[in-house]
Amino acid sequence: MISRSSVLLCVITSLSLARSRAAAFSLLATVPDFSSARGDRTQSKRGLASGAHGLKMDREYQLSRLKPYTPPEWAKHLAVIPSHYVELANTPSAIEDWRLPQGLVPEGFKVLVKRDDRTGFGLSGNKVRKLEFLLADAIQQEADCVITIGGVQSNHCRATACAAAKLGLGSYLILRQADAALEASEDPGLCGNLLVSRLVGAHLRMVSKTEYVKNGQVKLVATLAQQLEQQGRKPYKIAVGGSTVMGVWGYLQFVEELRMQMEAEQRVVSDIVVACGSGGSTAGIAIGLRLAGLDVRLHGVLVCDSKEYFYTHIQDTIDALGLPYKAQDLVVLHDEYKGKAYALSTDAELEVLRQVASSSAILADPVYTGKAICGLVGLAAGGEGKAFKGD
């Protein structure tokens, strides 16, 4: 029996260069518009047919990056198994003892942290694990560019653009922006992830929040893919957050990595806490823990949407992999730590992150991992009764 909880927090994002400017750079990336309340606008002279950096795709190089993939023994019976991956992340990411400020968690409460903020690619984060499998699939399907979608400061879109550039693939990012901001300017600027994405040659397609809600991500991506195909391109479509059945393998493999680390380092973990933003990482960890036989309770701290939405997404992934499980049996979702709204923090949340940074030098982004930390603190203090297994 575990007398006290030993909780592992998965750090899935690094603190971005939130207000970086690049006045000295003459960026070559175009910012063609998609569609908005104003209607379709004139496309850039470079047009849809141009690729990242305007370079020809090196098929031989791309094929050389493919590595045969052997799934863990406990996952070899799944209905969908990738045959290859591309090596992008620095893994395994370390597990560290985490000294939190006095008063944030009860005395004797042990907290560990898994540093996926140090994957070392495209400013780090969890998305690169999914992209190792998604971009391998793109190469196998002979794609010459990728399309994905997200918010204007999407970490996933930025990571996708970086990974695509590394592999000689073009990248097209459909970015959701507030209606008023898009009305004020067609150019989203060079702030944060936008700077990185534009530096690596991504093509940005801005869409208003109204247009995003009206059409949905599937239609927006499909429409752009059709336009690119008419220009002779071969796009590969990636859903929000890379949260697909292929992408989920990044976090099935994460569980095998974790299992081996726990065994080698003789660590005991009773619970895992992770931010849940698009559902792919949570789904992969949840399914992996059950298949690997690890007696660990998973907590997904929602940063947006609802429990119903994410349980449905996780269930769809379970079904697609041919498994008999119910999502509610694999993960406990918590929706009371979203703060003001997605990407908006309360003063209390920011104070927790300040205390964590000053005591441990771990800089948590406020959108994802920051919410997970606040969830961990709240649950440890007694939120939802005895939430952790070791309580």
Image: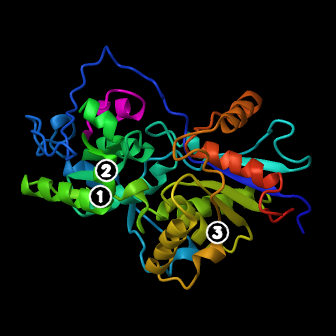
> Which residue lies under the disc numbered 2?
210
141 horizontally vs 111: left or right: left
Local crowd at mark 2 within 10 Å, few (<14), some, or many (≥20)? some
Look at 48% across and 47% down and name the residue there: 89
For the residue pair 178 and 366, the one nearer the viewer reads as 178
The span shown in magenta is 187-203
Quarter of the image where the C terminus is located: bottom right
Q: Which mark is residue 315?
A: none
Quadrant where the N terminus is found in the figure:
bottom right
The residue wearing badge 3 is 331
- Identify the element where label 3 is drawn: loop
Per the model, the C-alpha gap separating discs 1 and 2 is: 6 Å
Q: Position of residue 275 (x, y in %)?
A: 59, 53
Q: Amino acid at mark 1?
A: Lys
Q: Amino acid at mark 3?
A: Val
Most extreme residue toward the top is 24
Which residue is rendered at x = 81% and y = 53% of the image? 380
> Would you say 15 lies left or right of 30 here?
right
Give how far across and how far down residue 250 sits, in percent. Answer: 49, 59
For mark 1, give the secondary structure. helix
Question: Can you identify the residue that label 1 sits on?
Answer: 214
